[in-house]
Amino acid sequence: MPGLEARLKDKSAIIGIVGLGYVGVPLAVAFAEAGLKVIGFDVQDRKVAAVNQGKSYIDDISNETLSRLVTSKLLKATTDQSQLSEVDVIFICVPTPLNRAKEPDLSYVIQESEEISKYLRQGQLVILESTTCPGSTREIVLPVLQRSGLKVGQDFYLAYSPERIDPGNKKFSIKNTPKIVGGVDRESTRLTKLLYEQVTDVVIPVSSPEVAEMTKVFENVFRSVNIALVNELARLCENMKISVWEVIETAKSKPFGYLAFYPGPGIGGHCIPLDPYYLASKAREYDYHMRFIELAAEINEQMPYYVTSRIIESLNAHGKSIKNAKTLVLGVTYKQNVSDIRESPSLKIIQLLHEKGAEVSYNDPHIAEIQVNDVILTSTEPTVKNLSSADCIVIATNHSSYDYQYIVDNAKLVYDIRGVTRTIKRRKNIVRLGE
């Protein structure tokens, strides 16, 4: 039987991807489209059934694409992890959430490593893609895999390669986004680089999995810190009666040394709200406290509370108490034009408004139903009647499908968190964050 290198080069290698979510499905599709056979693994029957039926639940993957790959037998999904023994490469793309104490929960990574160790065989390459603490590949995954009796670098190979998927981004995909790879030994790095070259234009090998892990965390901490900075600036600009949006646009005229970030209701998605805590947790192992990073995370987490207080103030200024106020929130996903509500600050705002006694409804063209506390809400159409009957319209997510002129024209009061009404002539019924 040819070795892994030969099987990768002639595309006879079988790829196994554990975790069919926002990372796993696009990765599975990328390898299948490159001509390699892919088996996706997940514990949720509904996800496995959807993939096998060619029905995509990921925004960036169409039903047509998924169905074509399934029909051509390049892609299939299963809940049977014993089939891990049949694949040549195993990707770990499982969730890595925070627990209630905001500490990293790597239980899914550990559980999956234990499963893989049962079926690990000679010649296989295991790659961790999940966001995690620096050191996790070597300190957590490797010891579990070696319980199999196989030795890394000799019998099997292990590396870390952070996902760099930006949901909803039409410009950058797996193919044209540089991929970072760091193996626990040189051969693991070399084989991982060779593997990704099948689907990615640029592959960047680094000296260790720790460097790759730290790079991933740093990229998202960078965003968290800068978002916190501009959220602080927005609050100051409100007090100074300056438009933060004008400040940002003006600063963008500088052709060097500046990168634009924008204020908002908080941060969402899987990575940015979590990564600061992953890095801070690891730092504490070395008796080091990442105060700057932790403060940035706290500032961003407080934004839903601040926004809620400003909504209440705006209602009061228009002669309406928050008690029983009809509030329509537009957009509940964490970013525009996607159907991802993970860690979405819009959900927190709805919860806070509800707890303050408001009568809250929402609209989102991507999300038909949400649960807030014990209440199930369904998306309300932004008709003239629904807009005009609301005491306050909250623009929480700036979906491109919204007609903001239409919204403003039919609303009593608009609280714009995203600055999307800036091109509309100043009206007394518009209140914007950062102004």
Image: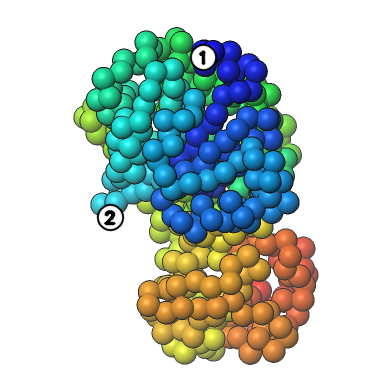
Q: Is residue 216 visible?
A: no
Residue 295: quadrant of the picture: top left
Q: Considering only vertical position in the picture, is 351 above or below 295?
A: below
SS for tag 2? loop
Which residue is at the front of the view, 62 or 212?
62
Which residue is at the front of the view, 398 or 128?
128
Residue 127 location in percent, x, y? 45, 28
* Pointer 1 local density, CA inside 10 Å: few below 14, some 14–19, many at least 20: few
Quarter occupied by the C terminus: bottom right
Instruction: Identify which amino acid the numbered label 1 is placed on.
Output: Met
Q: Residue at x 73, y 65 (%)?
A: 401
Q: Considering only vertical position in the picture, is 217 above or below 193?
A: below
Residue 3 location in percent, x, y? 51, 13
Which residue is at the front of the view, 403 or 84?
84
Residue 261: quadrant of the picture: top right
Residue matched to label 1: 1
In the image: residue 231, left or right of residue 338:
left
Residue 134 location in percent, x, y? 36, 28
Q: CA distance from mark 2 to mark 1?
A: 48 Å
Instruction: Identify which amino acid the numbered label 2 is placed on.
Output: Arg
Which residue is at the front of the view, 377 or 272?
377
Q: Residue at x 45, y 64 (%)?
A: 304
Residue 27 location in percent, x, y? 58, 37
SS for tag 1? loop
Q: Residue at x 45, y 73 (%)?
A: 371
Residue matched to label 2: 100
Indicate which label's residue lies in the foreground, 2 or 1: 1
